[in-house]
């Protein structure tokens, strides 16, 4: 008696549904992900056991390189509007530049040459660190040369050199560009960013573990001088090898 042949069934699996799900997941993660700002220098932060995360909106980051250069990054939020104008990250940066330029010109008597068009370009920058006197020239460069300037030029960074000026009352006051920038950011009319800075959640200082302590001390001292006494210092999570 012959063997009964069992009819083989097809092993083909329809992957159409799986492909659709994969595309949907990729789209979801792309739309909901928060991209990290590109930093002009590599900073390796000291380790600690703190697990508190730095906010992704309404925060000003102060980046201190191993060489002591200072860079700033400002993040607002998309929901804020004022007079039909967006006060997102770009809106805050634009207003901060114009405000900082006005104050710099007032205390030094020197023109920066910064235009409204410069402010539009500056609003696109995630991280910046350029003396205000050179900002117009910097914004005329293409992206590659801007990155090269921030990473390599000895003049890069927000200066903390004292600027002595006379007030309208005849008194002598002292400030510097770092203080001018921080005040301009605080007064950018983004109420949520301002409130976060008051609470200490809106200022994050990120320094390399090899940065000279005196440099970091100067940064923190400058913040306290302008009554910004609450801030956080960014660290990496300590591992078993630390």
Image (cartoon, grey):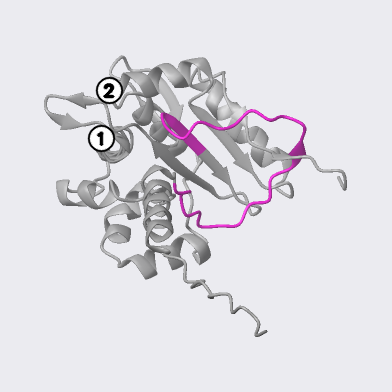
Q: Residues within 10 Å of mark 1 (few under 14, many from 20)?
A: many
Q: Is residue 5 above or below residue 80?
A: below
Q: Nearer the viewer, residue 151 or 242?
A: 242
From the viewer's perspective, is 88 left or right of 152? Answer: left
- Kindly indicate the quadrant of the structure image that contains residue 195: top left
Is 32 displayed left or right of 39 in the figure? left
Give the farthest residue toward the bottom: 2
Q: Which mark is residue 52?
A: none
Question: Which residue is at a point 28% across and 39% down the rendered structure image?
Answer: 101
- The relative height of residue 117 versus residue 232 in the rendered view (above or below) is below
**Outermost residue, front side:** 1
Query: According to the image, label 2 marks what residue?
Result: 189
State which quarter of the image contains the C terminus.
top right
> Which residue is found at the position 24% from the left and 38% from the top?
98
The residue lying furthest to the right in this view is: 241
Q: Are marks 2 and 1 in contact (CB under 8 Å)?
A: yes
Residue 94 placement: quadrant:
top left
Instruction: Determine if residue 95 is in view.
Output: yes
85 lies above or below 138:
above
> Is residue 210 rendered to the left or right of residue 228?
right
Earlier sequence position, callout 2 versus callout 1: 1
Span highlighted in magenta in the image: 35-61
Q: Position of residue 129 (x, y in %)?
A: 44, 50
Q: Position of residue 189 (x, y in %)?
A: 27, 23
At 52% from the left and 23% from the top, the residue drawn is 201
Q: Within the magenta stretch, is there residue 148?
A: no
Residue that carries the numbered disc 1 in the rendered image: 95
Q: Main secondary structure of the magenta part?
A: loop
Q: Position of residue 72 (x, y in %)?
A: 46, 42
Q: Secondary structure at mark 1?
A: helix
C-alpha span from label 2 to label 1: 9 Å
Label total for image: 2
């Amino acid at each position: 008696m012959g063997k009964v042949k069992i009819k083989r069934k097809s092993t083909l699996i329809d992957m159409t549904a799986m492909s659709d799900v994969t595309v949907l997941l990729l789209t979801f993660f792309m739309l909901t992900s928060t991209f990290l700002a590109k930093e002009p220098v590599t900073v390796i932060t000291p380790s600690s056991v703190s697990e508190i995360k730095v906010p992704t909106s309404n925060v000003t980051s102060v980046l201190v390189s191993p060489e002591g250069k200072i860079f700033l990054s400002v993040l607002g939020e998309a929901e804020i509007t004022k007079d039909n104008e967006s006060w997102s990250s770009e809106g805050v940066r634009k207003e901060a530049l114009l405000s900082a330029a006005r104050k710099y010109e007032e205390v030094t008597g020197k023109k920066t040459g910064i235009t409204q068009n410069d402010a539009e370009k500056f609003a696109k920058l995630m991280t910046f660190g350029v003396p205000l006197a050179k900002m117009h020239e910097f914004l005329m460069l293409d992206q590659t040369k801007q990155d090269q300037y921030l990473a390599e030029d000895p003049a890069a960074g927000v200066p903390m050199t004292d600027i002595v000026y006379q007030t309208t009352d005849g008194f002598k006051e002292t400030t510097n560009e770092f203080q001018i920038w921080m005040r301009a950011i605080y007064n950018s009319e983004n109420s949520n960013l301002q409130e976060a800075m008051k609470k200490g959640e809106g200022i994050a200082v990120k320094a390399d573990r090899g940065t000279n302590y005196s440099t970091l001390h100067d940064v923190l001292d400058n913040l306290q001088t302008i009554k910004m006494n609450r801030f956080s210092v960014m660290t990496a999570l300590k591992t078993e090898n630390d």
